[in-house]
Image (tube, grey):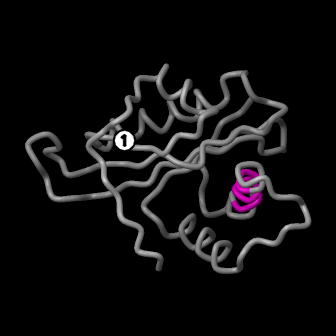
C-alpha cells in the first residue's frame, strides 16, 4: 500500500474516491446522481480549502482517503493557538478494510496537525468508524452543540 498527501494535480482521483465514499455511506447505487452543487463545492474545497487529504493506493488504484480541515478560532486557555481541526471523509474501499489503511491515513493527518500546533481534532464518527477512533484516543464529548442553518 502506498500513501500520499494529495495535491491539486490529484483532483480527479480525489473526486472519484469522495464520490465512491458518499455512495457507500449513503447507500446509493451507481445510477444515482449527485447534486451538482455538492460536486462543484467538493471540487472547490479540495482545490482551495484549508485542508489536507491523504490518499491510499494499491498500485494505480485509489482505495482510501481521509481529510482534515483546519479551523482557526480565537485562542483560549485550553486552545492557546486557536488552531483546531476536523477529521472527515475517512474511507477505505470494502475490499481493503481491516488492514490498517484508515489507521495509517488518520495517523498521518494527526502527525501533521501536531506539527501545525493544532490543539484539538474533532470528528463525526459512524458506528463502523467509532472503534478505530476510540482505539486511537478520540473520546466522545458532551461539550459540543450545533445548529443547522440550512444554507
Q: Is residue 98 left or right of residue 143?
A: right
Asked where in the image residue 42 lies, by quadrant, the reply is: bottom right
Image point (53%, 48%), residue name: 88
Q: Residue furthest left?
A: 77
Q: Is residue 97 left or right of residue 54?
A: right
The stretch of residues the image draws in magenta is: 15-22
Query: Residue 90: x percent and y percent?
Result: 60, 42
Q: How many discs mark residues in the rendered view? A: 1
Q: Is residue 49 above or below residue 13?
A: below
Q: Mainly helix, strand or loop, the magenta region?
A: helix
Image point (56%, 25%), residue name: 132
Q: Residue furthest right?
A: 31
Residue 145 on the magenta segment: no
Query: Residue 133: x percent and y percent?
Result: 50, 29
> Is disc 1 placed on a helix, strand or loop?
strand
Query: Residue 109: x percent and y percent?
Result: 48, 39
Image point (59%, 44%), residue name: 66
Label 1 belongs to which residue? 121
Q: Nearer the viewer, residue 107 or 20?
A: 20
Q: Nearer the viewer, residue 120 or 10?
A: 120
Q: For the N terminus, which image quadrant?
A: top right
Residue 16 on the magenta segment: yes
Q: Is residue 40 above or below residue 110?
A: below
Amino acid at each position: 500500500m502506498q500513501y500520499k498527501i494529495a495535491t491539486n494535480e490529484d483532483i480527479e482521483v480525489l473526486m472519484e474516491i469522495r464520490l465512491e465514499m458518499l455512495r457507500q455511506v449513503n447507500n446509493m447505487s451507481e445510477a444515482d446522481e449527485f447534486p451538482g452543487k455538492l460536486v462543484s463545492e467538493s471540487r472547490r474545497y479540495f482545490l482551495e480549502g484549508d485542508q489536507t487529504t491523504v490518499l491510499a493506493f494499491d498500485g494505480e488504484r485509489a482505495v482510501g482517503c481521509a481529510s482534515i480541515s483546519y479551523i482557526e478560532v480565537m485562542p483560549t486557555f485550553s486552545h492557546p493557538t486557536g488552531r483546531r481541526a476536523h477529521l472527515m471523509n475517512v474511507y477505505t474501499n470494502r475490499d481493503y478494510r481491516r488492514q490498517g489503511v484508515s489507521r495509517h491515513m488518520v495517523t498521518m493527518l494527526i502527525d501533521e496537525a501536531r506539527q501545525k500546533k493544532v490543539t484539538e481534532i474533532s470528528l463525526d464518527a459512524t458506528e463502523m468508524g467509532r472503534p478505530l477512533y476510540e482505539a486511537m484516543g478520540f473520546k466522545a464529548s458532551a461539550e459540543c452543540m450545533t445548529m443547522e442553518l440550512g444554507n
